[in-house]
Image: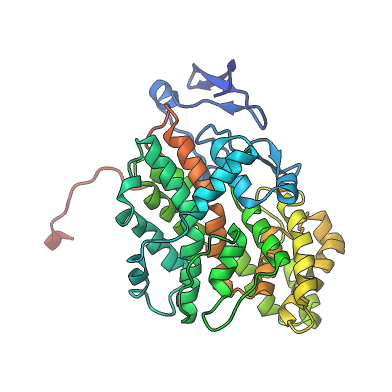
Amino acid sequence: MAEQTRKATLNIDGKSFDLLIHSPTAGPDVLDIRKLYAEAGVFTYDPGFTSTASCDSTITYIDGGKGELLHRGYPIDQLAEKSHYLEVCYLLLYGELPTAVQLEDFESRVTNHTMVHEQMHYFFRGFRRDAHPMATLVGVVGAMSAFYHDSTDVNDDWQREVAAIRLIAKLPTIAAMAYKYSVGQPFVYPRNDLDYASNFLHMCFSVPAEEYRVNPIVARAMDRIFTLHADHEQNASTSTVRLASSSGANPFACIAAGIACLWGPAHGGANQACLEMLREIGSVDRIPEFIARAKDKNDPFRLMGFGHRVYKNIDPRATVLKKSADEVLELLGVEDNPLLQVAKELEQFALNDEYFISKKLFPNVDFYSGIILEAIGFPTSMFTPIFALSRTVGWISQWKEMIGDPQMKIGRPRQLYLGETTRDYVDIENR
């Protein structure tokens, strides 16, 4: 917690109440209202918690006005260009970039935990073939607590560490299994000779009948998608994980809760919604029609994949991912894919149109990640599961930080009650 140096005074009905002001290392000052109800008998009202800090954290910082995203102080563009996903995982989990020896040990531990319990394979058979992969992911991740009893005690430091490694290692395997199940293909076991991103692609796209080789450009793009989605401060799914963990729930249940929250189209489903929008547009010659609809205040149509709730400038993740999108599209080609042709034309229109520039409606990370995943060959139903496996390390880092916080209390939001006051029960014959 930042040093308390100042106070604000709140006047209610002639009475004054002092509120401590915390000054962070970055970002706006924070009013401490923890004793407000006890001393003044009032709650604060903040739907969506858009002006409320629910915790103090040292993991991720976002400045939406500047278009800045920092993990442990390191800018996301530097991490995406110079680092790779597992190194960023280490940074988020432990607070510092690893030495060569530390990174080798961490990568080895993750690699050696990528297989899942063989009996978990039977779990998938209980789902319908056409089940959404996110539905499967929520169920199977939640069920991990039934298979890994030796890492569910949140009060044991070692068990927390084992659970963290297992989740980072096994989420790609489970996500790939969900995909394989949805398309009726056999599960592919992980390979210890492949890096994290390449292993995931191999588990998704290889089949027993022929050899599959991962293209390094595609693997690099996949790794960047993982890296750019690793953590994003106190968003809806991260807050869900923290709220679930505040009750003492086991880590697998907490991450399953985060995955369930991420499924929403306003959160993790945004890149899927973006591709569905591109399908609705259908062809390049219809782009002006939909641009006009987007500018019409009376039309409910929205251009998905443009602008961001937090970033009031360019999404720094989108700047990095655009480069990968260009590389992947050049490698795989867009000439035969009308959807990707629409995406490229729409991107150029938005980047050069005065309306979009003035409104700061730049293509965001969901726009470019959707394009890349579509080009690689993933169905839109897999976009959010890929987001979930990417974000797992962020959830775990936030979970570990919260568990280790001596100020931790079970989450209990208050409400502004507007319902009926006390009234007497009326017998049914008198109603």
> x%, y% of residue 348?
84, 67
Query: Which sits in the foreground, 413 or 314?
Result: 314
Query: Which sits in the foreground, 208 or 378?
Result: 208
Report the residue at 46% width, 46% height from top. Answer: 164
In this rendering, the answer to whether 377 lies above or below 356 is below
**Residue 296 seen by the camera:** no
- How are the colours assigned in the image? rainbow
The quadrant the C terminus occupies is bottom left
In this rendering, the answer to whether 123 lies above or below 12 is below
Report the residue at 57% width, 61% height from top. Answer: 193
Q: Is residue 176 left or right of residue 74?
A: left
Q: Is residue 252 left or right of residue 393?
A: left
In this rendering, the answer to whether 395 lies above or below 34 is below
> x%, y% of residue 209?
54, 84
Report the residue at 46% width, 70% height from top. Answer: 178
> x%, y% of residue 9?
56, 18
> x%, y% of residue 46?
52, 40
> Residue 42 occupies which quadrant of the picture?
top left
**Residue 195 seen by the camera:** yes
